[in-house]
Image: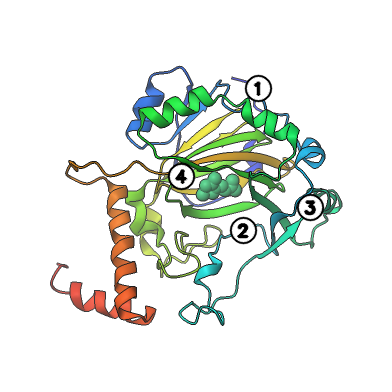
Amino acid sequence: MSEKLWNSSQLRRYDLDLEQIPRLHYTDPKVDELISQNKPVLITGSNIINTATNVWTPEYLEENLGNAGHTVFLSKNHKFKYFDESKMLSRSNPMGIEFIPPTRKTRMKVGEFMKKLREWKPGNERLYLQQPLNNTIGPQLVRDFLHFDWDYLNSKQEKHKWGELTSNLLLISQEGNVTPCHYDEQQNFFGQLYGYKRCILFPPSDFECLYPHPVHHPHDRQSMVDFDNPDHVRFPKFKNAKGFETVVEPGDVLYIPIYWWHHVESLMRGGPTVSVNFWYKGGSTPFNQQYPLKDYQKISIMRNVEKMLLGVLQDPKEVGPLLRSMVLGRYTD
Ligand code: OGA
Ligand code: ZN
């Protein structure tokens, strides 16, 4: 392993029970064992993202990302909690939830973004560029991308019966930025290209410890718990969450299994970071479904029940009371 170029003072401090995610060489057969069990694993030594590792630096991206506008989030603090605009109340969406976004979503050319990063000083809004790679990216980046180790990626996709590759998100972060704890409904190969990020993962079975917002809320899939200042009265089971962490280095690829919770932070005082992820659809349910169901399949069922109830009740405020009267004293002990 390469020399460690960061120290623990660069990690934010949380009151969490954490163990290390296994770091395995890409040729180690245990990699496939863990992926097939939907467990996280840090894959080292591979060529997956070699043509971009320590190549897609902020300077190189400024030169080669292209001249289109890119999605940039602005935050008054270090947290960038994702929100789904389509679930917000608006004239075109009278069923939406009244909600004040915690960050500002805007578009910027990469040059403008980099200039703001260079000139940034405390008190300024923090910035985080999050742009899916698409047909606007410059030709040099396209070449680098085409030379990723697609043989390896495709072999994992096939072996583990994942669905199609849906997107690659490019993330250019300022040091110290945090993506708060959430889960995605896709399999993720998270590739670290430049700088260091700490990733804290929790299994889908920690659902009750992490208190996700209701599915109709703009913060759907995000934990309601603020790790910086957890409200143990509202969220008493948070203290029972058992996390798995690792710090990803340039060249590392972290497998974040579908429906696994993850919190991601760019190390403090570590300079900007660059990552690219690979999001794959989950496999389709086999005709011959095996029982008992996997934890993550139950999360999917809960999401569908929530969505269905909202569909028939029409009012989000009616969902909780109905579930309560259905469950209390009948399915509780
Ligand atoms: C992801 C993700 C956040 C980050 O790739 O699914 O949540 O800050 N990334 O890198
Ligand atoms: Zn995510």
Q: CA distance from mark 3 to mark 2?
A: 20 Å
Q: CA distance from mark 1 to mark 2?
A: 30 Å
Q: CA distance from mark 1 to mark 4?
A: 24 Å
Q: Amino acid at mark 4?
A: Leu
Q: Amino acid at mark 2?
A: Phe
SS for tag 2? loop
Q: Position of residue 30 (x, y in %)?
A: 38, 22
Number of the label disc, if any, that sits on residue 301: none
- The crowding category of the residue bearing disc 4, from other C-alpha atoms within 10 Å (few below 14, some 14 to 19, many at least 20), is many
The quadrant where residue 213 appears? bottom left
Q: Position of residue 53 (x, y in %)?
A: 67, 28
Q: Which residue is denoted by mark 3 in the rendering?
A: 109
Number of the label disc, if any, that sits on residue 3: 1
Mark 2 CB near ligand 1 (8 Å cut): yes
- Tell me which label, 3 or 2, sits earlier in the chain: 2
Q: CA distance from mark 2 to mark 4?
A: 17 Å
Q: Which residue is denoted by mark 2 in the rendering?
A: 80
| Residue 53 visible at all | no
Q: Amino acid at mark 3?
A: Lys
Say if mark 1 contacts mark 2, CB within 8 Å. no
Q: CA distance from mark 4 to mark 3?
A: 32 Å
Q: Which residue is denoted by mark 4 in the rendering?
A: 201
- Tell me which label, 3 or 1, sits earlier in the chain: 1
| Residue 40 visible at all | yes
SS for tag 1? loop
